[in-house]
Amino acid sequence: MIPNKLKALWAEGKPTINGWCSIGNPFTAEIMAAQGFDSITIDMQHGALDYSNILPMFQAMRASGATLMARVPWNEPGIIMKALDAGAYGIICPMVNSGQDAARFVSYLRYPPHGQRSFGPTRVSFAAGPNYATEANDNMLAFAMIETAEGMANLEAIAATPGLDGIYVGPADLTLSLTQGRLAPGFDREEPEMIAALQTILAACKKNGIRAALHCGTPDYAARAIGWGFDMTTVGGDSRFLAAASGAAVAGFRKLTDGITGKTEKGGY
């Protein structure tokens, strides 16, 4: 089968950048995938989409060569297996709070004897190339999200889970949970206590030989995270990019036309 690009890049010691799709549309997904991201993740948890959207989105993005992944709504075997069968090469699972949660999650991604994934790769058997059944276990990526105080308390057990490929940090929920709502949710945390939490997660990943990933809001913060030792960072996403670019265009127009009346030169309309 076509090998997982992320694994190859990490084996070479290179950090990777992940794109994020929250809009359920193949065209916007195709545009995102054409921008040079190493991987693209479809957000099935909070994105404005469902399973009927992700399959054509995966189809639209296949030609880009990016590694395609999905964040599933929950740690539930049915949707995890369907996302894999649709073409995902990796799964990001939210709200993993214990070693038991992590072990169940990993088992849903692997065919026996390493897990309990049901065989029926409807689309991915074509999209991923031949020998999928024998090579899929080694190519699928399992990322557990740490985003709660309970998950932090059980961090060592989660990171040590056999078959887990990495931890993906959701800083918004993690901030809400660790501070009990004292700090507002958001990316690119600067508070010492939150940076310390990120460093603790990173250390647990390094100790257990797994990858560390962080959701960021800006390239500057993502670069800092890579400097700390994170292997993968997500920088923004389709809905945020659309809002930022359109907002900047409107703001630029307002600034440049401030004070200009509606009068036109002779011959104008």
Image (cartoon, rainbow, N blue to C red):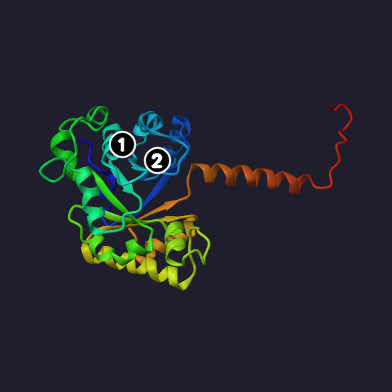
Image vertical order of residue 210 relative to residue 113, above or below = below
In the rendered image, residue 82, in percent from the top left (x then y), is placed at 28, 34
Q: Picture coordinates of residue 235 (x, y %)?
A: 45, 51
Give the image quarter of residue 81: top left
Where residue 114 appears, x then y in whole percent? 13, 46
Image point (64%, 47%), residue name:
248
Which quadrant: the N terminus? top left
Horizontal relation, residue 196 to residue 97: left or right: right
- When asked about the image quadrant of residue 146, the answer is bottom left
Q: How many numbered marks are there? A: 2
Q: Going 40% across and 56% down the picture, which residue do you hit?
A: 170
- Name the one closer to the observer, 245 or 181: 181
The amino acid pointed to by label 1 is Ala
Q: Quadrant of residue 86?
A: top left
In the displayed structure, would residue 204 be above or below residue 57?
below
For the point 89% across and 29% down, the residue is 266
As helix, strand or loop, the secondary structure at mark 2 comes to loop
- Tag 2 or tag 1, which sits nearer the N-term? 2
Which residue is nearer to you in this view: 226 or 266? 226
Q: Amino acid at mark 2?
A: Met
Residues under numbered marks 1 and 2 in contact, where contact means CB atoms less than 8 Å apart:
yes
Q: Is residue 165 visible?
A: no
* Image coordinates for residue 17, horizontal then vertical, percent: 39, 50
Quadrant of the snapshot with the C terminus: top right
Residue under circle 2? Answer: 44
Please tell me which residue is depicted at 48% across the width and 34% down the height of the picture: 28
Q: With 81 as the anchor, is 66 left or right in this view?
A: right
Q: Residues within 10 Å of mark 2 (few under 14, many from 20)?
A: many
What residue sits right under mark 1 in the picture? 83
| Callout 1 secondary element | helix
